[in-house]
């Protein structure tokens, strides 16, 4: 928020919310395990209940109050805070007064941030930034020596909150829902320590200090705390007893490396163990990590004067912090009718009242990760959305769709003899799309195009053999607030099934039965889950649908429609194991046959299949297909028992392997080099015939060259 240049942003009139969107509070948590190197198994260490779960609810506390007997001092009773206090501004002001290098660094960082966030296109991570975490538990009493379960619960909350996958994001008032953004940041406990040895990402130190404050004593072994691990390789989080009602504090980017990180009192950390209401939902760490990634308090830290700024354009100007559980609208600084964005993580409300980051805040965090915090991102998991797409509704017919630089949809086609409207020309079919269009064809000379509009609603147009409807550049509004591009399947004439993630990241579905949209034109059926990827959808027969998503633990989950009901339950899911670093890709080459492909966290390709009776190699196991993949795989089947898979390698070249009905070629873990310098491999959605394999790729010079081998 800020006093200057801010306005309340309302969604377009037709940005209808998804009907049937409910919370996933009653869902069961998901867990999985990493692929075991080259063992070929992507097996889970334990099998959770087959339903996807929402993340723990929001919560946080803290204001700029230092613990102990004075500013930056320790001391104070060991009692859980009752209102939020955060010491980040105490640390910030101290460093401004004592460290000329910090003053210079902050000026440089804000200049870089302004440059990146004022571009026409806001900065957005190309993949998922994964940040290694070390938790330093500094304890004086046995109760303060928190459990691994409490630490794990906090990591779960961070991952849900920074991916906008928290189940309580549905609490955001409708006028503010278009501001909700997925930061595309995930956290994991470090597995290697600074010396290169295996670790669980947790250190423990017993101390004689009864409580700490914001003077950074907890960050030094010589002062009763624990020394930091290198700040360019780890997010350091200290958990201890903070005094004086202090919930937590962080250091903005640009400060000394030995004090870089986040501090949280143990009663405000995680969702179990010693976590105490009203700060027992893990939101204190979410708030403080926001500061660590260069976010300011939402009211601009000017007291109540309405003159401060958080340097974010889409957060309304606000007169000081909100506490407790405000009622919407909470108007201040003349920001009516919608009032304060008090449900934002960077306000001071209770844990269960803060549920979102805004688009502008995500842009600032992205700019931080692309500049001063870039060394901290150990891996970036690229999960490109399917783009292009190309469909074929008869032999020697292709239709291709793309987004232009104005975000309108453009179309060209091959009719068996020539490209229309010309070799290099495109037909403009209008719209303003957030993502590449999704296209389906359920019969000859029939095309259905779906796109997510600027208001996140789903829009549809169709070609009936003679003209585009509802008009050449017009679209039918199908409602919803989509957090993912739509995915479409068709299993028969005049039948369409559309799937999208809702604002709560649950899966939602609507269908066309030949006469009307169900459950309504703008309504959706809620199918549950908290999904971390767009769905992969396939239909192997009439009235049969199979849907696959990545869960909050990065394992794969599955549900299916058998013609009469969703299984394993209307909102339940089958757990298929693995820890996936790409969107799932699903294909079917025969009735009751499914083949799934994902990239594991080690960059290798993995595969599993359903033969009509069982999953192979097992319900939660995966077949290793080798490689070091830098793209989501593209897989197609052009006949019974035939699969062709394409990926890009670390040299940006295109690679291919195939299943001929009896074995993988050129070998179980080998690939054929197809050359090129591919900018991005994109998922093919084509229905193919004969030996035509529709691989879509963008090259650095516009055309992949066979001799351009990395």
Image (cartoon, rainbow, N blue to C red):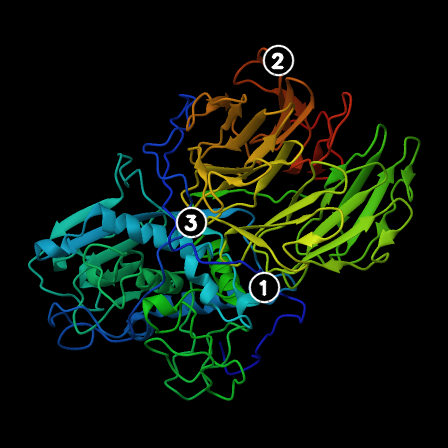
Q: In this view, does 449 lie to the left or right of 529?
A: right
Q: Give the number of the disc on residue 661.
A: 2
| Lower position in the chain sequence, tag 2 or tag 1 | 1
Q: In the rendered view of the protein, which quadrant contains the C terminus?
A: top right
Q: Is residue 46 left or right of residue 558?
A: left
Could one spot residue 433 in this view of the protein?
yes
Q: Position of residue 39 (x, y in %)?
A: 40, 21
Camera-side residue of 570 and 478? 570
Q: SS at mark 3? A: strand
Which residue is labeled 1 in the image? 17
Mark 1 nearby-residue class (10 Å; few <14, some 14–19, many ≥20)? many
| Lower position in the chain sequence, tag 2 or tag 3 | 3
Q: Give the number of the disc on residue 109.
A: none
Camera-nearest label, 2 or 3: 2
Q: In which quarter of the image is residue 561?
A: top right
Q: Position of residue 525 (x, y in %)?
A: 57, 52
């Amino acid at each position: 928020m800020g006093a200057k240049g801010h306005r309340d942003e309302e969604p377009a009139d037709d940005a209808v919310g998804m009907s049937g969107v409910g919370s996933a509070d009653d869902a069961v948590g998901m867990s999985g395990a990493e692929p075991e190197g080259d063992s070929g198994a992507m097996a889970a260490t334990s099998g959770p209940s087959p339903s996807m779960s929402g993340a723990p609810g929001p919560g946080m506390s803290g204001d700029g109050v230092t613990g102990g007997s004075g500013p930056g001092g320790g001391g104070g009773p060991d009692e859980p805070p009752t209102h939020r206090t955060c010491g980040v501004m105490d640390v910030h002001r101290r460093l401004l007064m004592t460290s000329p290098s910090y003053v210079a660094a902050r000026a440089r960082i804000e200049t870089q941030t302004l440059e990146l966030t004022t571009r026409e296109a806001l900065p957005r991570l190309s993949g998922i930034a994964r940040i290694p975490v070390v938790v330093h538990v500094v304890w004086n009493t046995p109760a303060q020596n928190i459990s691994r379960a409490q630490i794990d619960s906090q990591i779960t909350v961070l991952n849900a909150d920074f991916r906008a996958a928290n189940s309580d994001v549905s609490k955001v008032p409708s006028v503010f829902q278009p501001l909700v953004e997925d930061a595309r940041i995930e956290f994991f406990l470090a597995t290697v320590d600074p010396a290169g040895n295996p670790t669980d990402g947790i250190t423990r130190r017993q101390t004689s200090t009864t409580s700490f404050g914001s003077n950074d004593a907890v960050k030094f072994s010589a002062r009763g705390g624990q020394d930091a691990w290198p700040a360019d390789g780890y997010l350091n989080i200290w958990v201890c007893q903070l005094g004086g009602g202090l919930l937590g504090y962080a250091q903005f980017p640009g400060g000394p490396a030995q004090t870089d990180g986040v501090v949280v009192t143990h009663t405000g950390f995680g969702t179990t163990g010693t976590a105490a209401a009203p700060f027992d939902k893990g939101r204190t760490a979410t708030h403080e990590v926001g500061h660590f990634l260069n976010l300011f308090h939402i009211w601009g830290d000017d007291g109540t004067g309405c003159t401060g700024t958080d340097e974010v354009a889409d957060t309304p100007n606000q007169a000081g912090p909100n506490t407790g559980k405000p009622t919407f609208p909470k108007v201040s600084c003349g920001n009516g009718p919608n009032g304060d964005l008090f449900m934002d993580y960077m306000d001071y409300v209770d844990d269960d009242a803060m549920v979102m980051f805004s688009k502008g805040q995500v842009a600032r965090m992205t700019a931080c990760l692309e500049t001063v915090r870039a060394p901290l991102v150990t891996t970036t998991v690229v999960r490109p959305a399917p783009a292009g797409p190309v469909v074929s509704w008869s032999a020697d017919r292709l239709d291709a769709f793309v987004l232009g630089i104005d975000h309108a949809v453009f179309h060209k086609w091959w009719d068996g003899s020539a490209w229309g409207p010309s070799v290099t020309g495109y037909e403009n079919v209008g719209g303003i799309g957030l993502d590449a269009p999704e296209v389906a064809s359920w019969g000859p000379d029939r095309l259905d195009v779906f796109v997510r509009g600027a208001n996140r609603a789903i829009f549809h147009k169709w070609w009936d053999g003679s003209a585009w409807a509802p008009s050449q550049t017009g679209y039918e509004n199908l409602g919803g607030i989509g957090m993912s591009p739509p995915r479409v399947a068709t299993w028969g004439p005049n039948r369409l099934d559309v799937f999208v993630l809702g604002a709560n990241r649950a899966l939602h579905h609507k269908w066309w039965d030949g006469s009307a949209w169900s459950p309504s034109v703008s309504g959706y059926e809620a199918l549950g889950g908290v999904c971390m990827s767009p769905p992969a959808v396939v239909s192997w027969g009439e009235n049969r649908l199979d849907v696959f998503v990545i869960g909050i633990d990065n394992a794969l989950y599955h549900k299916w429609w058998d013609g009469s009901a969703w299984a394993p339950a209307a909102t339940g899911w089958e757990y298929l194991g693995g820890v996936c670093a790409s969107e799932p890709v699903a294909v079917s080459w025969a009735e009751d046959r499914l083949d799934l492909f994902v990239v594991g966290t080690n960059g290798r390709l993995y595969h599993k299949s359903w033969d009509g009776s069982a999953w192979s190699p097992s319900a939660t196991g995966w077949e290793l297909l080798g490689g070091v993949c830098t793209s989501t795989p593209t897989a197609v089947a052009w006949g019974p028992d035939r699969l062709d898979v394409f990926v890009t390698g670390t040299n940006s070249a295109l690679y291919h392997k195939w299943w001929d009905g009896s074995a993988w070629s050129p070998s179980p873990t080998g690939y054929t080099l197809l050359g090129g310098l591919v900018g991005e491999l994109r998922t093919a959605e084509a229905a193919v015939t004969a030996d035509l394999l529709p691989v879509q790729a963008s090259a650095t010079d516009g055309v992949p060259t066979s001799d351009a081998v990395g």
